[in-house]
Image (tube, rainbow, N blue to C red):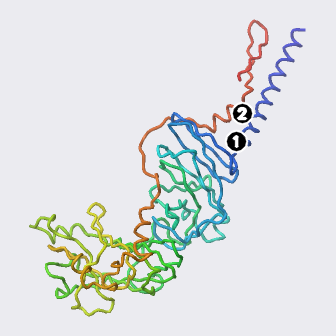
């Protein structure tokens, strides 16, 4: 009789384990969130790892208990308009974007977001897996911002990520770039199709391009146009303003098919060679010198004077001079080392819109690109704060197996213990 009882209880244990497995699987399926679901976010830096039915995945640590909701936008900004990286040919890889919203402002997170891609679909669009990106909509909604230092392509799971985030609020899009090269792409100087920057027209939308030495353009244009640049050797001393010398042995000559006007606003970063600065300023106090950009017309003769531009700023840390809000880009440009400030005198008195493209600060579009340049990934800064990783996904599975059966035999008696 006792043997029969033991057999029956052992059978019950096996059945209960089978049931617990089925329950766990069901819980795992139910754990996939949908658009509009309110997702609890654990506090005390416990891990919240939430997958969605379409493949979206959010992984975050939060010091406080919060909630978040993900919705989709079926009419997102076109993927053509990208800032923060270089290269052309960006396209949307998904039919909608993902909009993440927490119940309160949260900039104290350790987080990442993963968007799924289909390798077969990528091949059909001539996009390499290595050229997939997650873009975050800029604050001004004029471009998708990409951070190369935070990008990660997880090929084993067919997902592309933004990592090292401190905030998740925002709109995200899966982007691809149609190019043979991967990572950053830089434009070569010269003329011809392979050395041309092609800007797509779009009012209130922004694109960027960078040449091999770091000359970088941030463009907002209502109309499409093409841009090329050359670096001819030699700068005539007679073309220099008083008390100024050229920093480099060349000028940047920029030509485009763009028409100057209110529909065009361009910021340009001119790279600074620190070694040349030290050479040109040796024996002088650098604090008493000015480093600035000067311009003359595209077809100007060799001795025509260069005139310093308005709206420019030298960043020693970034090794560049930024000229903002230009409404015309064609021309010849040089970097000057000067003992005198020319900005107000040159552009404030007698400077016209052509010689001082950024002069008209009342233009609706002038300076728009420079304001937008501040709309980098919000809260996506690098953090080195360590954290104990406790997977909420695994915890969810554990709770899904809330019927854990342990058959303990003591003194020949079968005891079934339920742990809830």
Horizontal side of residue 151 vs 38, given as left or right: left
Q: Residue at x 41, y 77 (%)?
A: 363
Rendered location of residue 190, percent (x, y): 39, 84
Distance from disc 1 to disc 2, alpha carbons, whole Å, reads: 9 Å
Q: Element type at marker 1?
A: loop
Dot 1 and dot 2 residues touching (CB under 8 Å): yes
Rendered image quadrant of residue 374: bottom left
Q: Position of residue 249 (x, y in %)?
A: 23, 80
Q: Residue at coordinates 67% horizontally, 49% vertically from top-left?
A: 52
Q: Where is the N terminus found, in terms of image quarters?
A: top right
Depth check, front residue: 158 or 106: 106
First in residue order: circle 1 vs circle 2? 1
Residue pictured at 55% horizontal, 59% vertical: 134
Q: Quadrant of residue 342?
A: bottom left
Q: Which residue is mark 2?
A: 400
Task: Give the vertical position of 397 relative to 254 (above or below).
Answer: above
Residue at the left extreme, as displayed: 283
Q: Quadrant of the C terminus?
A: top right
Residue that sits furthest to the front in the current view: 362
């Amino acid at each position: 009789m006792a043997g029969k009882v033991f057999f029956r209880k052992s059978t019950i244990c096996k059945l209960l384990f089978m049931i617990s497995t089925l329950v766990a699987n069901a819980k795992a399926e139910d754990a996939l969130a949908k658009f509009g679901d309110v997702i609890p976010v654990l506090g005390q830096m416990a891990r919240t790892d939430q997958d969605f039915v379409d493949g979206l995945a959010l992984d975050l640590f939060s010091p406080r208990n919060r909630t978040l909701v993900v919705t989709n936008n079926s009419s997102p900004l076109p993927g053509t308009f990208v800032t923060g990286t270089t290269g052309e040919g960006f396209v949307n890889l998904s039919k909608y974007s993902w909009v993440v919203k927490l119940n309160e402002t949260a900039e104290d997170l350790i987080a990442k977001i993963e968007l799924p891609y289909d390798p077969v679909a990528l091949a059909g669009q001539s996009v390499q897996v290595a050229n997939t990106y997650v873009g975050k909509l800029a604050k001004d909604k004029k471009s998708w911002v990409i951070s190369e230092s935070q990008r990660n392509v997880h090929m084993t799971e067919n997902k592309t990520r933004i990592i090292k985030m401190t905030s998740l609020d925002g709109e995200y899009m899966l982007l691809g770039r149609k190019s043979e090269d991967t990572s950053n792409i830089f434009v070569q100087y010269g003329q011809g199709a392979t050395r041309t920057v092609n800007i797509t027209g779009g009012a209130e939308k922004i694109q960027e391009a960078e040449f091999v030495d770091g000359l970088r353009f941030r463009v907002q244009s209502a109309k499409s146009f093409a841009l090329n640049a050359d670096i001819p050797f030699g700068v005539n001393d007679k073309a220099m303003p008083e008390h100024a010398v050229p920093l480099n042995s060349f000028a940047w000559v920029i030509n485009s098919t763009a028409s100057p006007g209110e529909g065009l606003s361009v910021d340009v970063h001119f790279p600074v060679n620190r070694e040349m600065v030290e050479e040109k300023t040796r024996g002088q106090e650098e604090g008493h010198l000015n480093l600035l950009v000067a311009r003359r017309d595209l077809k100007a003769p060799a001795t025509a004077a260069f005139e310093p531009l308005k709206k420019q700023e030298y960043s020693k840390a970034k090794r560049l001079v930024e000229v903002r809000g230009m409404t015309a880009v064609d021309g010849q440009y040089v970097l000057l080392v000067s003992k005198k400030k020319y900005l107000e005198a040159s552009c404030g008195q007698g400077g016209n819109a052509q010689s001082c493209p950024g002069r008209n600060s009342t233009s609706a579009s002038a300076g728009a690109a420079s304001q937008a340049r501040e709309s980098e990934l919000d809260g996506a800064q690098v953090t080195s704060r360590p954290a104990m990783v406790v997977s909420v996904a695994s915890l969810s599975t554990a709770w899904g197996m809330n019927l854990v059966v342990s058959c303990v035999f003591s003194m020949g008696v079968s005891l079934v213990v339920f742990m809830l």
